[in-house]
Image (tube, grey):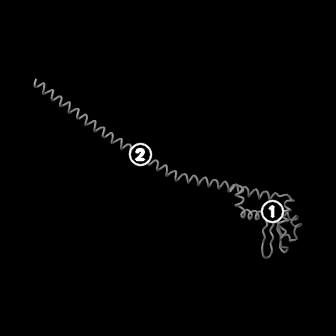
Amino acid sequence: MALQEILSQVEKAGQKQVEDIRKATNSEVESRLSEAREKGKAIAEEIANETKRQIEQLEQQEIPAAELEVKRNRLETQRRALEETRQKVHTKLGKLGKSDLEKVYKKLVSDLPKDGTLHCRKEDAALVGKLTSTKMGTSISVPGFIVETKDYRLDFRFSTLVEKVWQDNLSVVSGDLFGK
């Protein structure tokens, strides 16, 4: 029985060692798993922070770029609207009826020098000649007229007058068109 008892004690000691090894192994596995979880959380947090930083950086770059593009588009649209308005003015002046044209010419020739030479469209020569005693010169191809003296030249072509008035009043026209 002594042998049986020794074997039993050896078996119990072996089982205890196995149990201790199992506990130590489980503890080591849990410790490593916990460490791996912490590292995983840290890596995930680092990735999330880096992603958030990149998103914020993109927003800081893209939003102003988009705002600038919107502003450029708005300005281009406004520029086109202004240009269309100016073209409509030119077109309307080019199509003035005889009575309206006479009113415009009458106002323009009221202060002309008498010693110059007046150049106007061929179709307007009779009308302008009736309104002024200024000598008639060669014809021009656009509505309005030019007066030349030996010292200076006065340009009353409608296109020139529109451009001058346009430049002088561009901010007013913009305000009327775009509410500014």
Please, what secondary structure does the residue beneath circle 1 have?
A: loop
Which residue is denoted by mark 2 in the rendering?
Answer: 45
Please, what secondary structure does the residue beneath circle 2 have?
A: helix
Q: Is residue 161 above or below residue 32?
A: below
Nearest to N terminus: mark 2 or mark 1: 2
Marks 2 & 1, CB-CB < 8 Å contact: no
Q: Nearer the viewer, residue 107 or 23?
A: 23
Across and down, in percent, residue 24 comes to: 25, 37
Q: Is residue 66 above or below residue 103?
A: above
Question: In the image, which disc is placed on residue 143?
Answer: 1
Quadrant of the rendered image containing residue 145:
bottom right
Disc 2 and disc 1: Cα gap in Å?
75 Å
Instruction: Give the left or right position of residue 31, taking residue 87 as reference.
Output: left
| Classed neighbour count for the residue bearing mark 2: other residues with Cα under 10 Å, few (<14), some (14–19), many (≥20) | few
At label 1, the amino acid type is Pro
Across and down, in percent, residue 30 comes to: 31, 38
Which residue in the rendered view is the most extreme toward the left? 2
Circle nearer the viewer, 2 or 1: 2
Instruction: Give the left or right position of residue 49, taking residue 87 as reference.
Output: left
Q: Nearer the viewer, residue 135 or 111?
A: 111
Which residue in the rendered view is the most extreme toward the bottom? 151
At label 2, the amino acid type is Glu
- Which residue is painted at 15% across and 26% down in the image? 8
Across and down, in percent, residue 149 comes to: 80, 74
Q: How many marks?
A: 2
Q: Nearer the viewer, residue 76 or 38?
A: 38
Quadrant of the rendered image containing residue 167:
bottom right
| Classed neighbour count for the residue bearing mark 1: other residues with Cα under 10 Å, few (<14), some (14–19), many (≥20) | many
Instruction: Give the left or right position of residue 14, taking residue 42 as reference.
Output: left
